[in-house]
Amino acid sequence: IGESVLLTATGGIQYSWNPVSSLSLNTGNVVSANPIINTTYMVVGTDANSCSSWDTLSIIVNPLPIATVIETAVLCAGGSTGLIDVTATTGNAAYQYSIDGGTTFQGSNIFGNLPIGNYTIDVEDANGCATAVNATITEPLPLAGSLISTTDATCGQANGAGTVSATGGTPGYQYSIDGGTTFQTSALFDGLVAGNYTITIEDLNGCQVTIPFVILDLN
């Protein structure tokens, strides 16, 4: 669809072509046809003796591929885990796919390891018919954490505490005070002796940020 083809007749001095709706001209030995559906053309040729004959020519119109995409956002801000899954229909398989403006093509319909950005996927079928589809890869806000409060221990006891807060990323958040070995849904850690601590905050996508703090011993 969308391409023109030249139709040529010989043996006469006058020619008449039909149907005329998709032709550049309806007379002449060479006409340009641009049908949008399969079409059979008839040409009637007349020679110098006013003798006429006719012939037909059928043009098969291959449909353009139709492409749709499913976009998977980047998991963590600043990462390159985005994915575009392309589905092509109506064309003549097998399809080829390009994400670099048609410089290179691949047989796989999946493009992974993508950072945030706008992309154009070119799809070409076995007949060389091509279409393009746009896709946008997004990412969450950066995961961030802050120390809300601390309670110092007293008299060497394990009665200190620390509370953090998480923003950005992808809720829900989990919190760990043992380097990520175990997590809890509460942002409060209590029963702490004096010392240096680091709370690891992890969001739903596994993105992490760490918050250090100190519990003093008040005697």
Image: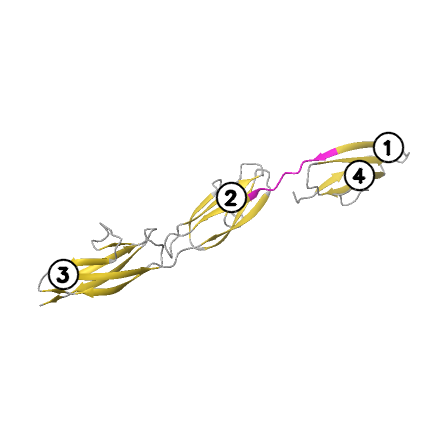
> Which amino acid, mark 4?
Trp
On the rendered structure, is 60 left or right of 86? right
| Distance from the alpha carbon under mark 1 to that under mark 2 | 50 Å
User: As displayed, is residue 120 above or below residue 153?
Assistant: above
- Name the residue tied to disc 3: 159
Looking at this view, is 68 or 40 the one in front? 68
Closer to the eye: label 1 or 4: 4
The crowding category of the residue bearing disc 1, from other C-alpha atoms within 10 Å (few below 14, some 14 to 19, many at least 20), is some
| Distance from the alpha carbon under mark 4 to that under mark 2 | 39 Å
Q: Could you tell me if the residues under marks 3 and 4 are in contact, i.e. CB atoms within 8 Å?
A: no
Asked whether 109 falls inside the magenta stretch, the response is no
Q: Position of residue 167 (x, y in %)?
A: 33, 60
The crowding category of the residue bearing disc 3, from other C-alpha atoms within 10 Å (few below 14, some 14 to 19, many at least 20), is some
> Which amino acid, mark 1?
Ser
Looking at this view, is 83 or 185 the one in front? 185
| Distance from the alpha carbon under mark 1 to that under mark 4 | 13 Å
Numbered circle sitting on residue 97: 2
User: As displayed, is residue 33 above or below residue 81?
Assistant: above
- Name the residue tied to disc 4: 17
> Which amino acid, mark 2?
Tyr
Q: Which mark is first along the chain, 4 or 3? A: 4
Residue at 81% in and 32% down = 54
Q: Is residue 10 visible?
A: no
- Name the residue tied to disc 1: 52
The dominant secondary structure in magenta is: loop
Closer to the eye: label 2 or 3: 3
| Distance from the alpha carbon under mark 3 to that under mark 4 | 97 Å
Q: Could you tell me if the residues under marks 2 and 3 are in contact, i.e. CB atoms within 8 Å?
A: no
The boundaries of the magenta stretch are 57-66
